[in-house]
Amino acid sequence: MKRTLLPLLAAVFFFGSCKKDNDKKDFIQLQKIENGEEAFNFQYNEQHQLSRYEVLRTFEDGGTPTLYRYAIISYENNIPVSADLYRKGETTDFYRRSQVLLHYNSQNRIAYTVKKYYNENGTYQEGNNDTVDYAFNADSRLASIKYRGDNSPWTFSYDAQGNIKLDPQTYSEPNYTDQSSYEFKYDNGVNPLSVNGVGLTIFALYEDDDFEINQLLSVNNATYNKTVYTYTYKNGETTNVDKYTDIYQFANTYDENGGLKEVGVTYNFEYSRNGSVEDTQNSQRTAKITCVKKQY
């Protein structure tokens, strides 16, 4: 087995609970997340790099999550170069829905990705590609992505511990303004998605379809996520302000090795119009996480 786990996606990643033991180091490896009606499986190659990622979903009340889509990641010289993304079809069992090709710059950081799409019968959707440019900061953390043809990049910043911060964003056009703000809090535990670039790999394939961006790219585990979306628009002579507030609180439990074991999730939602609350929702659930201690 090769003694190095880097570079993976050509970025710096932190190994959880690292400590020397006969010239070897321990780290936490994520195996499975069970989240009620969804589940996620993680498989690795001999270099402990993510090689297969599975998403399972429940399609009927009281049912057991079954495989819905999966990705197979291919490597060259310990760097991921492509991934085939499969999903359950309507007329077939599983088919390749898309393929992601990863291209690197001279510093072995992702320069851009190209995502190609396919039909259920296997034919390529000619001209239906997404090309995304990547930029990294001085600490080799993802700083921004931008779809070619789109003038608005998605930018990221980090606190001193390496956890995601998102700046407020505003989009305006005549008679309409869209604003968003974010507040994140973290504990000091090791985020298993950050170990050996698992979260960044998933982000390169699916972006934030399955996990929040701060769960994918932060070193530690979130304890609090607050997002506020505010829409201001004119309806004739009247100006309306719609505000949507999502708050997630996470109670994290760890096993004896420092691996994330369980997350109690409390969710609160509020919608208001012109300062008057129109709707609220709340829920609670528990996610179970399987992590194992590995050595390299």
Image: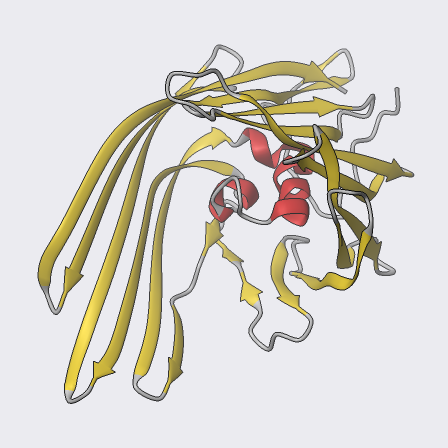
Describe residue 236's horizontal placement relative to residue 139 as left or right. Answer: left
Residue 31 higher or lower than 100, as above or below: above
Seen in the picture, residue 89 relative to 214 is either above or below; the reply is above
Confirm whether residue 159 shows in the render. no
Outermost residue toward the left in this view: 276
Which is more toward the observer, 280 or 292? 280
- Farthest residue, direction right: 77
Q: Can you give x and y, in whole percent of width and height, for residue 21 in the image? A: 71, 12
Residue at left offset 68%, top offset 63%: 135
Report the label total: 0
**234, 171: nearer the viewer:** 234
292, 3: nearer the viewer: 292
Quadrant containing the N terminus is top right
Q: Residue at x 58, y 33 (%)?
A: 193
**Quick one: which residue is furthest to the front in this view?**
91
Left or right relative to 166: residue 250? left
Q: How is the image coloured?
A: secondary structure
Q: Position of residue 174 (x, y in %)?
A: 35, 89
| Camera-nearest residue between 44 and 189 | 44
Does 43 sit left or right of 240 as displayed?
Answer: right
Vertical relation: 12 (above or below) 167: above
Query: In which image quadrant can residue 127 be found?
Result: bottom right
| Left or right for 214, reference 92 | left
- Residue 179: give x, y in percent of width and height: 34, 70
Can I make out residue 129 in this image? Answer: yes
Q: Residue at x 54, y 39 (%)?
A: 219
Q: Quadrant of the C terminus?
A: top right
Q: Residue at x 57, y 17 (%)?
A: 291
